[in-house]
Image: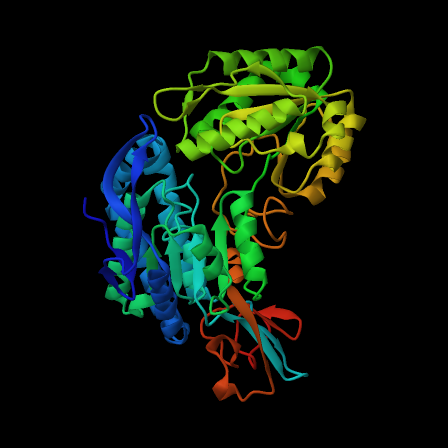
Amino acid sequence: MAVQPLLIDGAWRAAQELRGSFRAEDPSSGEAIGAAFPICGEADVRAALAAAVAVADALAAVPVERIAAFLDAYADAIDADVDTLVALAHAETALPKEPRLAKVELPRASGQLRQAAQAVRQYSWTHPVIDTAAGLRSHYAPLGKPVLILGPNNFPFAFNAIAGSDFASAIAARNPVIAKAHPSHPATSERLAQLAHTALLQTGLPPASVQMLYQFEHSLGAALAGNPQLGAIGFTGSRAGGLALKAAADTVGVPVYVELSSVNPVFLLPGVLAERAASLAQEFFASCTMGSGQFCTSPGIVVVPAGAAGDAFVDAASKHFAAAAPNVLFSGAVLEHLQRGVATLRAAGAECLAGGASAGPGYRYQPTLLSVDAAQFLREPRALQTEAFGPVSLVLRAADVSQMAELARAFEGNLTGTLYRAQDGSDDDAWRQIAHALRPRVGRLINNKMPTGVAVSPAMNHGGPYPSTGHPGFTAVGMPAAIRRFAALHCYDNVPESQLPADLRDHNPGAIARLIDGVWRVNDLNGPTT
């Protein structure tokens, strides 16, 4: 079988050093489908890096409007190709065409690209600051080096290495991108790369600004991550994989933005359980099984107080899980990882209330609900916070609100933390107590709704303390903040205005919000303060 080409240095070309090939699999059957894609060797990785390094300066100097034009053109091309892209992603991931892929995720991907384009035009990501008394001016600027992006398995569009938020952010900051496609959806990634390449040529960006490799050995990945010619790395995936990349990159000071794991604890307070335990059980079950539980914000742990209302919730939730059909997972590797996670939880004392087994054909697993008392969790907090990536959640039974707060303090860093409280205000004091303990441990604190799903908003934080991510100060979603991960802070001291970047000159290039002598202004430096 012929092997598909790589996108390197502005052209689709055969791998120079082919070390094997692979095909996508239909998760519902486990059968290989579609074309063969290359596992490339060192020569191809080096070629991609060299090409990206060679165009980094040229891309950093490209006018703002052309960068924005590329992002918009790419977004338009994705929207126009919805039928082909959705069919490919459905075949490779078994995610439903409607509404997940066609109505939710694909529009999110193109929307992110357009939001990045808007941030580029408005210079909002550059955060210009001017101190006239000290003669200092600073802003965020391109790294002047390539960015390596490794996409996850669970979002074939919105987090794809060549179309997702990391990609849009790196390009918006005017850095070349080397995208490493995920092997769970190579044909989807190939089609996106074709659309990106066409948009690149149409808008006149340097041809090697966007490149894509499909697969290479872990040792090559570590060597690439540890190459000082890289400017930064964006990674979403397993904790082990992300930490291996980070360890390699740290040796040469390459910044790495990794999203690793999260159990996203949900606290159900006594009053809200008394109000609506049955409806909360349905809401919880739906969130756990949405997308077969393969979301980074799936509720992996729910904390429930002891008592009749808590018992009613657990009983109702158990029935939902027990009655559900096995869910299709992305791959055999995901299934194996999930089985290991459940085994770890059970070995640490968790009891299986429903599910707990794999099923055929393909890669399927029963929706699974486990339970353990709070005292055991506090004795084994590390093992009982093991992420089980799939339709699995662990119920913690707490004696009272005080113990719920103690549990909150025992959690590792997470992307989200959720609290449900009663409408009559009876839970408000408990909410404040638990939220105070939980707030430093989560990136996003949520009230009265399940955590599954991430709004693409400038106010969103899709990040959190370690081990949910590698740095608590950054988000992978939301422009302009996401762009600043792939930027450098440049300061100019007593530099003549003619030599300054456009957004730092006296004349404002277009309603940019700039911090001038401690005041946010959108007019020219010497104009009236508004």
Residue placed most toward the observer, 198 or 268: 198
Q: Quadrant of the C terminus?
A: bottom right
Image-based side of 395 in relation to 451, left or right: right
Q: Is residue 488 above or below residue 311?
A: below
Q: Is residue 476 above or below residue 499?
A: above
Give residue 304's position: percent from left, percent from top: 68, 21
Q: Quadrant of the N terminus?
A: top left
Q: Residue at x 58, y 75 (%)?
A: 138
Give residue 493's position: percent from left, percent from top: 61, 84
Asked whether the viewer can see residue 504, the reply is yes
Give residue 76's position: percent from left, percent from top: 28, 52
Image-based side of 164 in relation to 4, left or right: right
Q: Residue at x 38, y 40 (%)?
A: 105
Colour convention: rainbow
> Number of callouts in the render?
0
Residue placed most toward the observer, 48 or 422: 48
> Quarter-wise, where is residue 354 in the image?
top right
> Quarter-wise, where is residue 515 in the image?
bottom right
Residue placed most toward the observer, 459 or 358: 358
Asked whether the viewer can see residue 65, the reply is no
Q: Is residue 164 above or below residue 83?
A: below
Image-based side of 402 in relation to 336, left or right: right
Residue ranking furthest to the right? 402
Q: Residue at x 49, y 47 (%)?
A: 236
Give residue 35's position: percent from left, percent from top: 23, 42
Residue placed most toward the observer, 319 or 267: 319
